[in-house]
Image: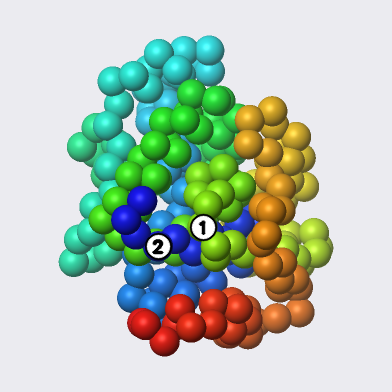
Amino acid sequence: MAGRVIAIDGPAASGKSSVSRGIASRLGWLFVSSGHFYRAIAWGVLGEKIAMDSVEAWLVARQLTLHEESAGITLRLDGADATPHLSEPEVAATVSLIAAVPAVRNFINARLRSLADDHDLVMEGRDIGSVVFPQTPWKFYLDASPEERARRRAKEGEIDSVAERDRLDSNRTTAPLIIPQGATVIDTTHLDLQQVIAAVLSHLGTLTSTA
């Protein structure tokens, strides 16, 4: 791993994506959402009507790549741009089931780790500091009350249940959602975006002076 990695984990609607984007912008690093990779796979599985017990075999020939373009970052699955489809209701309803498949997690983790060969990363997800990059010294876990997270989810127009996502993410056998060892925990319930970004930057210390 040539690049540096800031790992930001937490449950759905805890603020991970917005905070990670803000930190990446401040540092000039690449923002990556591991959830987008899982949603891209979910989109592909749905589009090709792949049964859950056939997902592992289907993955063998798949190519999932991240591209930096003038209009932003895109994810391409076998050359097709998956980015516009990542928030579709069917994808949102399927992604936790897809993420529970060990072969999918292995497939995506390999691609996430390869990004650190060429980039400094701010990566958000549910197992970044615990599984994908456990060696990074910069680990954060964002959380908020279930009520606040449900409110945020509804405001974003997302229809998946926060409680159900929490249950699936925390109880799956492979890489369940946990607080990574050594992570700084930040409760975002009563903080706005800029306050959370400031809290993370304060913990990063001298790292921000090199940005």
Tell me: residue 80, above or below residue 204.
above
Residue 155 x, y percent position in the rendering: 63, 66
User: The residue tagged with tag 2: helix, strand or loop?
Assistant: loop
Residue 110 x, y percent position in the rendering: 39, 37
- In the picture, the disc for residue 65 is none
Residue in the image at 66% along x and 61% along y: 183
Tell me: residue 95, above or below residue 22.
above
- In the picture, the disc for residue 136 is 1
Judge left or right: residue 179 versus residue 18.
right
Between residues 83 and 210, which one lies in front from this camera angle?
210
The amino acid at mark 1 is Thr
Is residue 197 in view from this perspective? no
Is residue 129 in view from this perspective? yes
Residue in the image at 40% along x and 13% along y: 57
Residue in the image at 61% along x and 47% along y: 130
Residue occupied by mark 2: 4
Q: Are marks 2 and 1 in contact (CB under 8 Å)?
A: yes
* N-terminal label among 2 and 1: 2
Residue in the image at 71% along x and 66% along y: 185
Between residues 100 and 3, which one lies in front from this camera angle?
3
Decide: few, some or many residues near mark 1? Use Cα within 10 Å; few <14, some 14-19, many ≥20.
some
Q: Quadrant of residue 119?
A: bottom left
